[in-house]
Image (cartoon, helix red, strand yellow):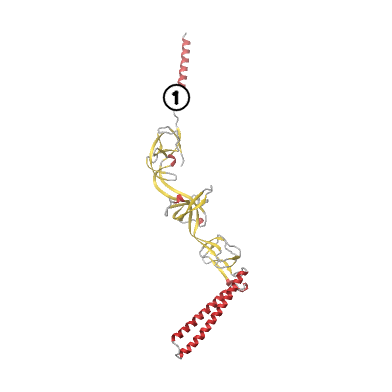
Amino acid sequence: MNRSQVSKFLMHRWYAVAAALALLGVMIWSLQPRPIPVEVVTIDQGVVRSTLIDEGRTRMHETYVVSAPMTGELLRVTVEPGDVVKQGDTLARLSRNRAGFLDARTDSSTQALIAAAQSRLRAATAAREYASVEYERAQKLAESRLIATSTLDSARTRLRTASAEETTAKAELSRARSALLPAESQNSAGQIALVAPSSGYILEVRQESATAVQAGTPIIVLGDPSRIDIVAEFLSQDALRIKAGDTALIENWSTGQSAGRSIRAIVERVEPTARTKISALGIEEQRTRVILRFDETLPAELRAHQYRVDARVILDQVDKVTRAPPGALFRDGDDWSVFVVRDQRARLQRVELGTRGDDFTEIKDGLRVGDKVVVFPNRELSDGAKVELETSSR
């Protein structure tokens, strides 16, 4: 074998060795564990708040139902829902034009009452006349000193009693006859004005057209907007955690320029009674009413009745504490742990928890502000694993 052939042989050997080394390097690289992509958040300080939220409605604290004080004819009501009225304003008028003439039976009953009143008046008049004669006779006998003074006093008392009974009988007869006054004899003075018991808004007109009504028939509902409450219905098991005096936030009350603004409120009362309600999914639920009052100036838009809002009751709140999102926490035996990212590797770190809130959990020990922790760690992640960071937005 000459020198040229030896050189070619050696060159082919080096090519083979280089290819084998390259293949070995690729195999070694492919077998190396690759970094696990993870989402991380930075631990900070802030507020941790635990709340309960449910649907609520505005309610005017003082509402009034204006009813018919007697049976009669309601004239057409001119006020409409939304009208502003002042205390003492006339809301409607009630006439007695139809009172007593609703049917033949009522007419006959009234005639019988008149006849009975007339009989009582005749009897009372006769008794008064007899008592008057007795008194005059006793007065003459007393002047002649033929009877005692006490006898004269008794006769005088009987006369006064008989006179009073006659007056009462006359009044009863007048009242019975008033029910049969002809319609043409009545004028505007015979009408009764239904006035507003308080200043406020007309909420509802239950009887709008002219019609005959019975005594006690509801006609108009009036609300006083000077005080507005919130009535929220919480699940009974949630209501057990709410107590009077708790702070609350009224949310989602507007979709306009005020959207997103919360209004402070205070829990005034938790009613001790639960009511069975059917949810949108058809499930029976026990709901308890929680009454809240506003703790700041109320926007004009909310001075209304039965408007929908969201009531968020704050159960617990701590300020300026180290906090972490719940998605970063997981159980490790009996302890809570997180994965802290240090030097591009995940390190298992046990932590001590404090107040658990809706969006964050208080970290009492184990983490510092500025630490980066993995959120929603997958099963592949373990202590010491190499990771590739992806920042999570909170």
Residue that appears at 43% across and 39% down: 328
**Would you identify the image quadrant in which residue 120 lies?**
bottom right
Q: Nearer the viewer, residue 227 or 41?
A: 227
Indicate the position of residue 350 as horizontal and vertical percent values: 38, 38
Q: Against 200, is 46 above or below?
A: above
Q: Nearer the viewer, residue 194 or 150?
A: 150
Q: Which residue is mark 1?
A: 28
Circle 1 sits in a helix, a strand or a loop, which is it? helix
Indicate the position of residue 244 as horizontal and vertical percent values: 42, 54
Q: Against 10, is 191 above or below?
A: below
Count of marks, rendered view: 1
Residue lying furthest left: 365
Residue that appears at 55% across and 80% down: 123
Residue lying furthest bottom: 144
Q: Against 88, is 157 above or below?
A: below
Residue 290 showing in the rendered view: no
Residue 37 showing in the rendered view: yes
Residue that appears at 44% across and 40% down: 327
Q: Nearer the viewer, residue 171 or 158?
A: 158
Q: Nearer the viewer, residue 312 or 323?
A: 312
Indicate the position of residue 91 as horizontal and vertical percent values: 56, 65
Indicate the position of residue 190 as horizontal and vertical percent values: 58, 72
* Amino acid tagged 1: Ile
Q: Residues within 10 Å of mark 1 (few under 14, many from 20)?
A: few
